[in-house]
């Protein structure tokens, strides 16, 4: 039976990809952020996931404002990256866990989630940066992926409550998957940040701490705010926390904190990483 080993939650600021490309991990600006990945590297080496189910948002590379699915699930055997204009090296294609994607899609639609299924899907910095952080070195990434994109861009946005329910339905699908894979869940984006407008540069440490404290033990607490409340609290891009909320749902009922890191700022963002381990994994990953 497949096993959900745990969840990696991280900001996905494109400049992090630039720092990786230039080898700046020990630079004084970057070190406090990159140091947060040391425990995650140790944990991944022990947990040995084969598949990553990754909740993120597309920023205009694959979906643009003219066609914006609320929830989109990849069903491809490979996913291309492309130049978004951030000056990042284009990464080689990521292999997809295609059969597992279709199993998740079947389960979500049967559970009345009207998702968009994507047999072709380019993946942007919100997927490539977290995977590069988790497994440094492009030839060194031992996982296949299932990308799940949530609309955080074009209003109306899905509610945090609906995102948690989506994640929980993905958990049910994974629990019913007959394969032997070890599955890690990733949630990317956040924490508080706003890139433009009058509140550009806005950060809310109190709200970020509330998210980090509650995501593992009490994810419902994060669903008490509406999407618009979160934009008020965390900035217009801070709404990317809904990717974390969905990913938390996919971990199942129990998620114990293994490590966290919070550092302000990376670019315009309150940058955070959080590692949660599932109840199923506790006795097996050490
Ligand atoms: C930044 C943060 C993001 O989440 C993003 O998608 C792009 C840029 C930033 O802080 O620069
Ligand atoms: Fe983003």
Image (cartoon, rainbow, N blue to C red):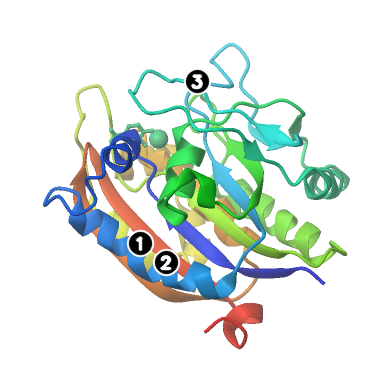
In the displayed structure image, the side of residue 197 where residue 130 appears, left or right = right
How far apart are the two marked residues, 3 and 1, measured between alpha carbons?
Answer: 27 Å
User: At x 31% / y 56%, what residue is drawn?
Assistant: 208
- Mark 3 CB near ligand 1 (8 Å cut): no
Q: Which of 61 and 247 is in front in this view?
A: 61
Q: Name the residue under label 2.
A: 40
- Mark 1 CB near ligand 1 (8 Å cut): no
Q: Say whether residue 188 is visible.
A: no
Q: Name the secondary structure under disc 1.
A: helix
Q: Name the residue under label 3.
A: 60
Percent x, y of residue 236: 35, 33
Badge 2: how crowded within 10 Å, few (<14), some, or many (20+)?
Answer: many
Q: Name the secondary structure under disc 2.
A: helix
Label drawn at residue 37: 1
Percent x, y of residue 52: 62, 54
User: At x 37% / y 45%, what residue is drawn?
Assistant: 190
The residue positioned farthest toward the front in the image shown? 139
Q: Of the residues tagged 3 and 1, which is closer to the observer?
A: 1
Q: Nearer the viewer, residue 191 or 119?
A: 119
Q: Of the residues tagged 3 and 2, which is closer to the observer?
A: 2
The residue positioned farthest toward the left in the image shown? 28
Q: Which of 143 and 120 is in front in this view?
A: 143
Label drawn at residue 283: none
Q: Name the secondary structure under disc 3.
A: loop
How far apart are the two marked residues, 3 and 2, measured between alpha carbons?
Answer: 29 Å
Q: Say whether residue 163 is visible.
A: yes
Q: Do the residues labelled 1 and 2 touch (CB within 8 Å)?
A: yes
**Viewport quadrant of the N terminus:** bottom right
Percent x, y of residue 237: 37, 35
Percent x, y of residue 229: 39, 42
Quadrant hosting ligand 1: top left
User: At x 64% / y 59%, what residue is drawn?
Assistant: 250
């Amino acid at each position: 039976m497949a096993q959900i080993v745990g969840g990696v939650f991280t900001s996905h600021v494109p400049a992090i990809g630039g720092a990786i490309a230039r080898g700046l991990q020990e630079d004084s600006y970057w070190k406090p952020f990159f140091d947060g990945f040391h425990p995650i590297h140790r944990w991944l080496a022990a947990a040995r996931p084969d598949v990553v189910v990754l909740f993120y948002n597309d920023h205009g590379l694959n979906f643009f404002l003219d066609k914006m699915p609320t929830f989109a699930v990849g069903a491809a055997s490979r996913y291309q990256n492309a130049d978004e204009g951030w000056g990042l090296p284009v990464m080689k294609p990521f292999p997809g866990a295609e059969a597992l994607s279709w199993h998740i899609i079947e389960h979500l639609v049967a559970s009345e989630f009207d998702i968009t299924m994507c047999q072709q899907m380019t993946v942007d910095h919100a997927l490539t940066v977290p995977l590069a952080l988790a497994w440094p070195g492009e030839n060194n990434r031992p996982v296949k992926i299932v990308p799940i994109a949530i609309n955080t861009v074009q209003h109306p946005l899905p509610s945090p409550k609906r995102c948690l329910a989506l994640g929980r339905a993905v958990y049910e699908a994974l629990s019913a998957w007959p394969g032997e894979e070890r599955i890690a869940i990733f949630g990317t984006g956040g924490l508080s940040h706003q890139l433009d407008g009058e509140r550009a540069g806005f950060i809310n440490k109190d709200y970020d701490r509330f998210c980090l404290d509650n995501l593992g033990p009490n994810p419902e607490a994060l669903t008490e705010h509406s999407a618009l409340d979160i934009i008020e609290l965390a900035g217009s891009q801070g709404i990317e926390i809904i990717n974390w909320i969905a990913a938390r749902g996919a971990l199942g009922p129990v998620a114990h904190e293994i490590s966290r890191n919070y550092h302000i700022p990376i670019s315009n963002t309150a940058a955070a990483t959080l590692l949660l381990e599932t109840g199923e994994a506790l006795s097996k990953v050490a």
